[in-house]
Image: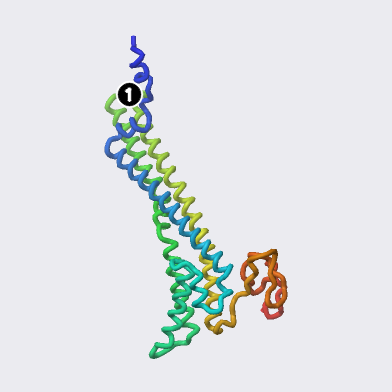
Amino acid sequence: MATPAAAPAAGANPYGLLPALEQGGIIAWSVFIILVGMSIFSFYILFTKLMQQQKIISQGRKVRASFWNSANLREASTKLDKKSAYRSIVDDALLAQEQHGKLTDPIDQHDWMANSLARSQGSIGARLGEGLAFLATVGSTAPFIGLFGTVIGIYRALIKIGASGQASIDVVAGPVGEALIMTALGLVVAVPAVLAYNWLVRRNKSIMEDLAAFTNDLHGFLMSDGKVKPQMAGVSGGGATSKTGATTQRGSEPLRTGQTSTGAQATPTTADRV
């Protein structure tokens, strides 16, 4: 008769995760460690990229709130954080403007500024995209790494069947359980990585659209000596009155071509239809 102390050991599950890994040996442990490492780095990239994106989004709000209200571009740049993506674009634009006059064989200033701003914007886009390739790699390879562990587990089950001469459940349960665990781990690692990749790419696209709009406004401002800049809505009170006397909504975006102050699409003119 078994003693009370021996009863839990006798009733313990011999087919759990740790027993399966112990039976699988170095191959099972290697696959498990690789998948866990992939998962840890995937979540690390996810959280760090989210913080980076949120920082740029917050910087964009500051730009819309006060940047274009400054007297000149240098004064406006001081309102932005030193490590801001928007500050980087402004500084690069001012530097390009100074360098244009030093060219021995100068090109058109419009093209020079457009190329400089595009290069600055592309550099920010490259930084935003760092780490996303790892998420894509994890999403595409983790199921196959788990499948490798699955194949090894099935192989071990077949070896046991051949050695024992019978296919009883107690012979194949351990290796088959190990195989199923590896398949599940591969999916558990891959699915969050794919979801994180798609989400971060979508947020990057939205951020780059805002940066492109800001770059375009900045280009027009520089090429017109400050005469062309986006019309900003008021940021305090229930509403603000623009220079034309029209009331704008609080905290709205800069008014673009083809939009009214309320954000509705303006009726296209004959020139717009062409």
> Residue placed at 52% from the left, 81% from the top?
222
Rendered position, 258 above or below 135: below
Location of residue 230 in the rendering, given as x and y in whole percent from the top left corner: 60, 75
Q: How many marks?
A: 1
Q: Is residue 205 visible?
A: no
The N terminus lies in quadrant:
top left
Amino acid type, residue under disc 1 in the picture: Gln
Residue 94 percent coordinates (x, y): 46, 79
What x and y, as percent, mark residue 161?
31, 28
Q: Quadrant of residue 253?
A: bottom right
Q: Nearer the viewer, residue 197 or 171?
A: 197
Graded by Cα atoms within 10 Å as few (under 14), some (14 to 19) or many (20 or more), the crowding at tag 1 reads: few
Residue at 46 percent across and 47 percent down: it is 192
Which of the two residues, 85 or 138, is positioned nearer the viewer here?
85
Q: Nearer the viewer, residue 184 or 52?
A: 52
Identify the image quadrant of residue 13: top left
Asked if residue 195 lies left or right of residue 170, the reply is: right
Q: Is residue 69 left or right of residue 52?
A: right
Instruction: Please state the horizontal and vertical placement of residue 186, each as a whole percent of the image.
Output: 40, 43
Residue 254 in view in this figure? yes
- Toward the bottom, the furthest residue is 104
Q: State the SS at label 1.
A: loop
Residue linked to disc 1: 166
Q: Quadrant of the C terminus?
A: bottom right
Give the vertical position of 57 relative to 217 (above or below).
Answer: above
> Which residue reaches farthest top?
1
From this view, report whether residue 239 is shown above or below residue 140.
below
The residue at the point 43 percent across, 79 percent down is 95
Q: Is residue 269 left or right of residue 2?
A: right
Image coloring type: rainbow
